Every structure is written in structure tokens, then in C-alpha cells.
Amino acid sequence: MINNKGKMNKNLVLVMMLLLSVGCKAEKIEMSEVPERGFYSTRPATYWEESLVTGNGIMGAMIEGNPYKESVVFNHALLYLPIHKPLKPVSQGKYLEKVRKMMLEGKYTEASRFIVDLANSEGYSGKHATDPFIPAFRMNIQSDSTTVRNYARTVDFSTGEVAVKWKNDNGTFCRKVFISRPDNVVVIRLYSKGNGKINTTLNLSQVTTHDAGRVKKFSLNDKLGIEKVESTSIEKGLCFRAWYERPWEGSFKGYEGVVKVVRSDGQVQADLDKLTISGATDVLLLARVEPSSDMNNSKINDMLDEISTLPSDYQKLLQPHEKIHKELFQRVSLDLNATAADRTKSSEELLEAGGGNPALIEKLFDAARYNVLCATGINPPNLQGIWGATMTAPWSGDYTTNGNLPVVISHYLQANTPELMLPLFNKLESYMADFKVNARELFNCRGIYVPSRFSTHGLNNHFDATWPMTFWTVGAAWYSLFYYDYYLYTQDKDFLQNRALPFMEQSALFYEDFLIEGEDGKYVFNPSYSPENHPVNSKSQACINATMEVMGVNGLLRTIIEASQVLGVNQDKISKWKSMLAKMPSYELNENGEIREWMWKDLLDNHKHRHASQLFGLYDLHDPLIMENDKFRSGCKKAIDRRMEIRREDNGGIMAFGMIQLAFAASALGETETAYDMLKWLGNSYWNNNMVSTHDPKKTFNVDICGGYPSLVMKMLVYSEPGVVSLLPCKPQDWTEGMIRGVALRGGILMKELSWTPQGVKAIFFSKTDQSVKVSLRGKQVKEIKLKAGQPMKYSF
């Protein structure tokens, strides 16, 4: 309790104060109750961002964990509030030559302003934001308070169960929550042991909204796009309905939800908008939320009827769910030889131990994957995954495609969970018609254009003069690389032919029309955009030849040629794509030898920024134009070092996913110390005690790095391309012994196990096909191994 300066640990003081605020005594919990792969926290949430989370990819739930005044917030993946009716993209394409001329004359600010004025003349009337992700409602569980002992709240990553446990003078009490994958229902069990009885009141209420860090109550005078809400009780149940104020054609009109007591050994009484449970020791609640396209025809009774067909036994509901959830979660595991003592620490203690602590790294590796797994289903995770307890989510809680979304999905393939990529592809393909409209209206181009932000539709409506996002063109090219990477990992030729290649072809078609040749015969990207940054010598983010865009199109053209050759198609187009590759501008270095972020005349690099977009070619599949060129490798390393200088000045700085991108690039270059520094920083600063990540240090609920963190760990331990595997390319010296299991490799290989000690390295590979693979250890000792289809092959290095 006392540190070496004789002062009480500040975190412990905070914990004790919080426990006392709910009548808790800070006593040691029983370790037998802590999940083997999960965590425990020693205090309830102090604000909603610290709530424990669970989900099934359709619904999510956030549980604060207060024994006597509990809050459970229900979420649904499709609850985006229709505020901004989709608009036809601004007719930028009609004036593209004028815009290009302004850009070539260096009138970047004027070009951005011109597009905004044009949009306003066409009915935009200011910034047109994406529709925001909102919570459904809050279930309040309130009881008379008394003394609490042995308090703990836990999450079991293997089952998806959230639990809140405590003791008082009458006995032991527990609440458990999970969301069933097969039954699509929220399961909540309240039970007690000993002489304790459950005497509590339940009601449903509209979620509060954040206002400058404070919480204020929602009211009909502050509708925020909700026209009205109804919260009522029925026999042994509660119902909630919300009508959207401004639905547009094709949007949902509102949503509905039910909570039903399906078993209780006590009394259950309905009264107006609440349920009172008394004298019980075991209560089971089932709940569901659904969006509605027709609020005049309620589905409340349908939901209640479906719930009535389900078992009223907790374990019978849990078992089929656990089978699905656990199988996905356990496909990959990490062991860094952490001490038993550290592994039994609470989340608060582990975070205090620091980002380099092996037990914390193991825990965050698991927690991050758990969070993203729970949020993936109907859709890929949005900025908040599938959760939120505010009506005004930061950045609308949307899909920000220019960095956030690629980071949150970045580990799916490595973690041998390729099916989790499919919701991303489903979402993109559902908006193909909108993407084609974007290409036509913004650039007079065929093909598709993926905007930098979207939620309820795929039209590019979100931009302003400061953020000229209609100038960012690399979205479709970037996501084409994920389509092709899915094939590289799975070797699924049907997917390559029927889904990946058609998307890639539409993306390439756009660039056939968009790219123009400059005086030197090389293509000019005009207009262009390097996400959210501007050159030192220009106040405008609008630019020409953003390096990111050049790298993205290089990657697209390389991979579409490869994909076509694999399938034996597009023979008439391959020569065109090769010709386009030859016309791509070469990457450039600035006066300091750093890779330039803008490859245009005198546009000067600005390293005081959270993104590192000029390193795009090192995020995932490595760009050979960088990796095979010592000058460019050195230039990328120097750019990383400069960005790190800024981060160090800010002690990590804002925006965690930008640090992930830096760390991906450092790992690609074998910069072990730099990558490890950033991994430790991420552990030090960007997680709350609920083991959910934040956008800024300890601020703003955001799941981006829940995808990026495990991806970075895996990249540091193994990198693969078809026929090539690099073991431990960026393993820190601190990790003297360890093991990782279940990492997928490109080429249809599963690395069932990789272990290392000071004495050597062992790996077990499982290949789908007979193949030869060149394996290197820390970039050296290249060894060619032969793998036989369907047979585990063990090798020592």
C-alpha cells in the first residue's frame, strides 16, 4: 500500500474511495472466481467508458458493475440515428478541370473552398455529417444499499460472460450477462447464495447524453433526433420503443426492445414502467433489441413470443453460445512467460505495472481480440465497436475508412479468423451502387470510389473546407488489398473470382479514368489528400500526389495483375495495368532523407501530426518498392524517427491508431526497439480498467487498437508472404522465452505453434497444400522447408 517514498499509491487510494462510495470494503477476492482467460476489476465504472462489455456482433451490452445501482446499456449494430438525409455527391466532376487548374497553381485553399461553396449551392447547407451510432436504452437495476465485501467484476474472454460479484452480511450476490450468438438474446442472471435475497426494481430509460464531460438527463426538450420514447411494463416484462424524428426513405424509423423475466423463485410485480422483484434467490432475464422499419406495426409481441420458446435455464442458454464464441476466441493464444503473481493481478494493477509487463501484454492481446470479436457480426466494428452510452458519439461512431477501420480489422487474418473479415466485405458490397455514384459525380469516372467516412449509406457527403475529403481517392484501392489478402491467407479461389477480383476491377477502372499524365510522362494525382495532415508551408490539406495514394494504387495494380494471373483471366487488361504501373511516380525523399508525404514540388513534410500516411506501403503486405530499395527503407525509418520525436514530446500524443501505424511500419523494417517502445506506450496510456481501448490517453472510448494491438504483436513475432516466412523479425530482447499458437500465414499455412528460448526456436506448420517455403530467423539464417498438405511439420531453428 505504501510506495518507496512513504506515500500511499494513488491508484489504490482511488480504488478505495470508489469502493467506499458504493459501500464496498476493499478486500481480496477469491481467485478461483477469476476466469483463466479473462480479467477482474476491483471497482465499478466511474463513468460509462469504464463499463464492462459483451456482444454477439448484433447486440452489445455495457455493464457498469455497481452492486446497488446498476446500469446495463443495450446496443444494436444497426442503430444509427437518421439525422442527415443522403445527398447526391457534390458535382465536383463537372468542375474537375477547374479544380485541377487551381491546384496546379498552388491555390489549394481556394480549391477546397470552391467545392464547399458549390455543395452549399446544391443544397448541403454546411457540413453534412454521417448519421451517428446511438445506444438503445438503459436498464436500471436498483436495490437498497448496504455494506459490500469481496467485490469484483469480471469478464471471461472464452465465454463472453460479464459478472459482478460481492458479499454482504446476508450472503453472496452475483449478476452475469452474455449475449447469445445462436439465439440472439441478451441473457442476464441475478442470483444469491446464503441468506441473501434479491429485492430490486428494474426499469428501462433513454440513455443520457454527454455534454462537455458531464452527464445530463435526456428529455423530450433535448430530443437529439428522437421524436418520442415509450417505456412500459407488462406481465413480468419491460418494453421500450423509440421513434426517430427525421427518418429518411430507406432508413429505419425507430427501434424496439423487450426485457422479460423468464424465471424467478421470488415475486415479480409490474407497476407502470417498472418491475419489482422481491424475495428471490435466482432470476433469469432475457432481452432483445431490434430496429424497426415500421413503428406503426410493433414487433414487441413477436420478440416476446420468440423469447418464450427459449430455455429458461442459464447453462442451457450458455452452452451453445460458448461453443461458437470459444472456438473463435481460442484460435490464437500468446504466452510471454509472465509470472503467476502478475497473471493474477486485477486490471487496475496490471495497467499500473506498465506497458512492458508480460502479463499485461498477454492480457491486452486477449482483451483486444475479445472486444473486436464481440463487435463483429452484422457489420465490422465501428469506431466504438458495437457499444456506447451517449447520444452524441465522437465522430458519429461511424466507419472512418482512412485509418481507423483498417486498423480495427487488421488482425483478423493473422489470428486465423478470416470469417470475421466477411462483414467488412458485405458492408462494402452493399454500398457498391453509392460508390459508383461517388466516382461519377466527384470525378467523372467509371468504377467505384469509397469515401473516407460512412455509416448508413456510401455516398460521400462528409467534408468541408478544412477537411477536403472529396479529394481522397485511395479508399477503394486500399480495401482491394484486404480483399486480395483474404485470398492470400485462405487460398479461396472462389472468393478471389467472385468477390475479390470484381471489387478490384471496379477500383482499377476508376484510376484508368482519373489518372492524368504530367509533362514527364508520369501520372499526377490531382486532386489528392493525405488524411488530415497539411504541409508545413501550406495551410490546406488539399494537395497533389499524396504518397499514400501513390502507394495504394501501386499495391492495387500489382495485386490485380497477380489475381488475374492466378485465375487465368483479364489477359487483355494485364498489359494496360502493367503500363499504368510504369507510369506511376517514384517515391521521393526530402532534404533530410525522409520519405516525403507529398511528392509535389515544394510541399514540405509536417511531422507534427498523428497520422503517418506516407508509410502506407508498410502497414500490411510490404511494398517491394520500399523493401527492395535501401534508400527508401532508410527514408521510411527516418520518417518514423521524426514522427516518434513528436510523440515523445507529447508522451505518446493523441490518436492511438496513428501509433499503431507507426509501429506496423517499424516492425516491417525490423526496427525492434522502436516497435517495442510503441507497444509499451500503447499499454501504458490507451486502456481503461475495463480493458477496452481509448482514442487518446485514457480518453474517448474507441476500439481501433483492439484490432491493431494484437496485429502488432503478431507482426513482431512472424511475417509472411506466399513462399516466405520470417520468424521473430521484431522480437524484443525482454521476451527471452515465449510461445504463440494459431497464427495464420499467407499461402494457406497455419503456424500451429512458435516457441522460443535462449537455446533456440521451434515452429510447427500446417499447410493446405504441398509447398516449399523459405524461412528466416530474425532476418537471417534462411532455410528452405518442405510442407506436406494436411500434415503438421515441426522444425527447429
Image: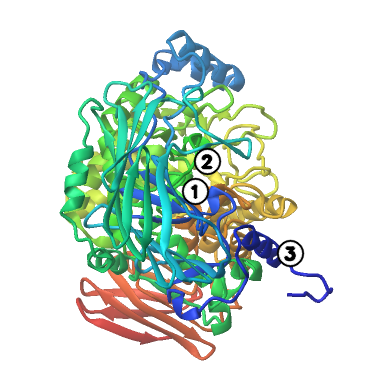
Q: What residue did someone put label 1 on?
A: 616
Q: Up-down: is 606 above or below 519?
A: below
Please name the residue shown 51% across and 75% down the image. 778
Q: In which quarter of the image is residue 249?
A: top left
Residue 87: horizontal and vertical position, in percent?
37, 19
Q: Which residue lies furthest to the top in this view?
A: 121
Left or right: residue 225 compared with residue 187? right
Q: Which mark is residue 539?
A: none
Q: Are marks 2 and 1 in contact (CB under 8 Å)?
A: yes
Q: What residue did someone put label 2 on?
A: 547
Q: For marks 1 and 3, give the CA distance.
A: 41 Å
Left or right: residue 129 compared with residue 47? left
Other residues around mark 2 within 10 Å, as few (<14) / some (14–19) / many (≥20)? many
Residue 619: horizontal and vertical position, in percent?
48, 54
Q: Up-down: is 203 above or below 708?
A: above
Mark 3 falls on what kind of element?
helix
Q: Residue 10 carries which label?
A: 3
Other residues around mark 1 within 10 Å, as few (<14) / some (14–19) / many (≥20)? many
Amino acid bearing label 1: Phe
Please name the residue shown 45% across and 67% down the image. 173
Q: Up-down: is 446 above or below 762?
A: above
Residue 752: horizontal and vertical position, in percent?
33, 77
Mark 2 falls on what kind of element?
helix
Mark with earlier residue (1, 3): 3
Of circles 1 and 3, the one toward us is: 3
Q: For marks 2 and 1, give the CA distance.
A: 8 Å
Mark with earlier residue (2, 1): 2
